[in-house]
Image (cartoon, rainbow, N blue to C red):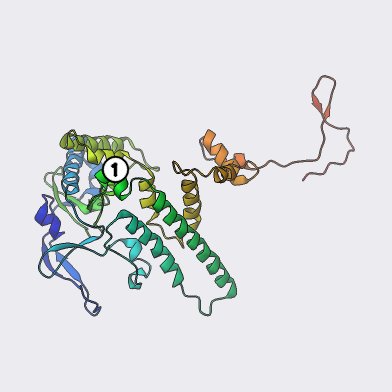
């Protein structure tokens, strides 16, 4: 937060006091006391604003996002201030490395000099976390289920490493967007304060706790609140997204690195999204997703795997085939095999099928 205040035009609350804990001594708790931001949270007024006010706020966020996008760092991690008052990139402070008791585990949190090193560490993180689950005195059935889940986690970790190795555009694969910058796209509406008197004026942005340094292609994203929603209308979101993109294009000019990265919705983006999942809890989602992605990577197509995936003799295969040709929520219903019978229909002279005489025994399978 202090870095943003010192090096950018983004308004942040003034830091009144703080204490860091950079040693191995855990007896002291780090803290920060901030000035109360003026104004009101944007999430409480965004839909009552006029289109002009909404456009002004989004355009300002685009300018600040691009301003901070131009800052460069030497590694993936989180920014820290050392005792001399200098800023440095240190261990990564992201939720997947700390939630659900993970803060106490000796995980590799960086800093990471390459994107491949970071995503490999994300995979190893899930393996390390699955190994410390408590099973002493647990019922045999639970222990068996746990062992099965651990095997699934091992499979997921292996696939994550394979995807990291085969993913195009990481590090030297796309040198223009390989450098590192601050990623602020996760800042939410509740973190943005606007003036009560002039609601198109942003007065402060708070909650920088999990802001970290990442590759440029990770940083070049729309704010989370400008992404299309599956549950709400997208007309306002589409208009504001267009305003954001137009302002970025106006500033970037003939070298639109941000927009190029924003439009490249490729395997890198999928890898980054999957790296935040909990492999133990979300394995039922991760495993098939990784298998399908690896089977269709350009230049690494798994023909045998795709054939098995689309096998019409299996329910998943029928679902996959129907999904390629139709839209709607009845894919599973359409893929279900209808009841079959050993009833042999008779064919008349005109070629029409007729029922057998009454009294024939019919067995329905």
SS for dot 1: helix
Q: Quadrant of the N terminus?
A: bottom left
Say if residue 326 shows up in the picture: no
Identify the residue shown where x is 63% and y is 45%: 314
Residue 237, located in which quarter of the rendered image? top left
Say if residue 123 shows up in the picture: yes
Identify the residue shown where x is 10% and y is 69%: 84
- Front residue of this view, candidates 359 and 139: 139
| Name of the residue lying farthest toward the top | 350
Question: How far across and how far down the image is residue 290, in percent?
Answer: 47, 51
Query: Can you say whether 241 is above or below 353 in the image?
Result: below
Residue 52, located in which quarter of the rendered image? top left
Question: How far across and how far down the image is residue 333, in percent?
Answer: 60, 42
* Total count of labels: 1
Which residue bears the numbered disc 1? 226
10 Å crowding of disc 1: few (<14), some (14-19), many (20+): many
- Front residue of this view, candidates 308 and 281: 308
- Front residue of this view, candidates 346 and 253: 253
Query: Can you say whether 61 is above or below 116 in the image?
Result: above
Query: Can you say whether 274 is above or below 313 in the image?
Result: below
Identify the residue shown where x is 55% and y is 72%: 143
Q: Please indicate whether residue 322 sits to the left or right of residue 362 in the image.
A: left
Question: How far across and how far down the image is residue 62, in percent?
Answer: 19, 42
Question: How far across and how far down the image is residue 213, in percent?
Answer: 24, 56
């Amino acid at each position: 937060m202090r870095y943003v205040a010192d090096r950018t035009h983004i308004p942040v609350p003034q830091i009144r006091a703080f204490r860091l804990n950079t040693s191995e001594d855990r007896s002291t708790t780090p803290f920060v006391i901030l000035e109360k931001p003026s104004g009101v949270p944007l999430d409480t007024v965004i839909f009552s604003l006029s289109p002009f006010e909404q456009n002004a706020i989004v355009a300002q966020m685009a300018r600040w996002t691009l301003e901070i996008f131009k800052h460069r760092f030497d590694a993936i991690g989180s920014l820290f201030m050392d005792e001399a008052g200098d800023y440095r990139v240190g261990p990564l402070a992201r939720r997947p490395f700390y939630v659900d008791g993970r803060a106490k585990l000796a995980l590799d949190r960086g800093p990471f000099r390459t994107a491949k090193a970071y995503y490999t560490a994300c995979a190893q993180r899930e393996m390390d976390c699955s190994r410390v689950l408590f099973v002493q005195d647990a019922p045999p059935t639970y222990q068996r289920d746990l062992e099965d889940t651990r095997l699934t986690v091992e499979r997921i970790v292996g696939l994550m490493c394979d995807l990291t190795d085969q993913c195009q555009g990481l590090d030297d694969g796309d040198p223009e967007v390989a450098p590192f910058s601050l990623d602020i796209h996760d800042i939410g509406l509740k973190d943005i304060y606007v003036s009560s008197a002039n609601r198109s004026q942003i007065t402060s942005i708070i909650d920088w706790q999990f802001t970290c340094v990442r590759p440029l292609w990770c940083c070049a994203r729309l704010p989370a609140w400008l992404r299309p929603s599956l549950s709400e209308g997208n007309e306002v979101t589409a208009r504001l997204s267009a305003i954001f993109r137009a302002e970025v294009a106006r500033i970037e000019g003939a070298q639109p690195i941000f927009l190029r990265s924003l439009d490249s919705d490729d395997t890198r983006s999928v890898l980054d999204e999957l790296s935040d999942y909990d492999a133990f809890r979300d394995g039922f989602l991760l495993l098939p997703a990784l298998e399908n992605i690896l089977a269709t990577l350009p230049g690494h197509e798994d023909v045998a795997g795709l054939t098995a995936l689309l096998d019409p003799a299996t329910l998943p295969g029928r679902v996959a085939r129907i999904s390629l040709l139709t839209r709607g929520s009845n894919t599973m219903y359409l893929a279900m095999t209808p009841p079959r019978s050993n009833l042999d229909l008779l064919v008349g002279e005109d070629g029409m099928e007729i029922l057998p005489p009454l009294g024939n025994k019919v067995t329905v399978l």
